[in-house]
Image (spheres, rainbow, N blue to C red):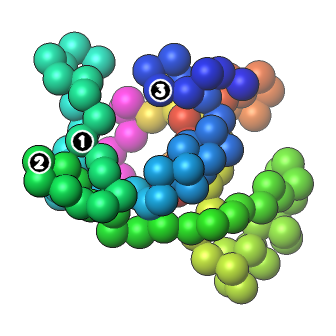
Amino acid sequence: GGSGGCEGGIAELAFESVIKAGGIASEWTYPYVSHSGDDFACKFDINGTKNAVAPVANFTSYKRLSHNDYSELMTAVATVGPVSISVDASSWSAYESGVYDGCNMSSPAIDHNVL
């Protein structure tokens, strides 16, 4: 769901944006600006023209895996590459180190994607 951008959304919206733009910039060249930042102008340009940011990575397709299928997820990580997962991160603010075990198993509110 969601509409993307500051309105939130699903990983597929981000993937489609990267495919349409012809790539994605690095954090180093295009740092995060919070919702209260002053400049929302897109600096990305596939050609890397002056005052623009050139892409450093690209992909042309993606595959949606089954929901909550551990075996399929592990196979994808081992044979395909990085995966994006959707998680309930509402209790992550207190996390400091080690194996996280604060998952809300009864009524998760999915609110973040992790690559």
Residues rendered magenta in the picture? 93-99
Q: Is residue 36 above or below residue 51?
A: above
Indicate the position of residue 78 as horizontal and vertical percent values. Answer: 68, 83
* Disc marking residue 5: 3
Lower sequence index among marks 1 and 3: 3
Q: Amino acid at mark 1?
A: Lys
* Residue at 48% across, 59% down: 22
- Kindly state the secondary structure of the residue where label 2 is placed: loop
Q: Is residue 18 above or below residue 63?
A: above
Which quadrant of the structure image shows residue 79?
A: bottom right
Q: Amino acid at mark 2?
A: Asn
Assign the N terminus to one quadrant of the image. Answer: top right
Indicate the position of residue 108 as horizontal and vertical percent values. Answer: 71, 27
- Residue 13 in sight: yes
- Return the residue found at the far top: 36
Q: Nearer the viewer, residue 13 or 97?
A: 13
Disc 1 and disc 2 in contact, CB within 8 angstroms: yes
Q: Nearer the viewer, residue 92 or 33?
A: 33
Question: Alpha carbon of mark 1 to alpha carbon of mark 3: how far?
Answer: 15 Å
Q: Nearer the viewer, residue 51 or 25?
A: 51
Q: Is residue 83 left or right of residue 17?
A: right
Indicate the position of residue 113 as horizontal and vertical percent values. Answer: 56, 42
- Return the residue found at the far left: 51
Secondary structure mostly seen in the magenta stretch:
loop
Q: Is residue 28 above or below residue 113?
A: below
Q: Amino acid at mark 3?
A: Gly
Q: Which residue is label 2 attached to?
A: 51
Indicate the position of residue 7 as horizontal and vertical percent values. Answer: 51, 17
Q: Residues within 10 Å of mark 2 (few under 14, many from 20)?
A: few
- Kindly state the secondary structure of the residue where label 1 is placed: loop
Q: Which residue is label 1 attached to?
A: 43
Disc 1 and disc 3 in contact, CB within 8 angstroms: no
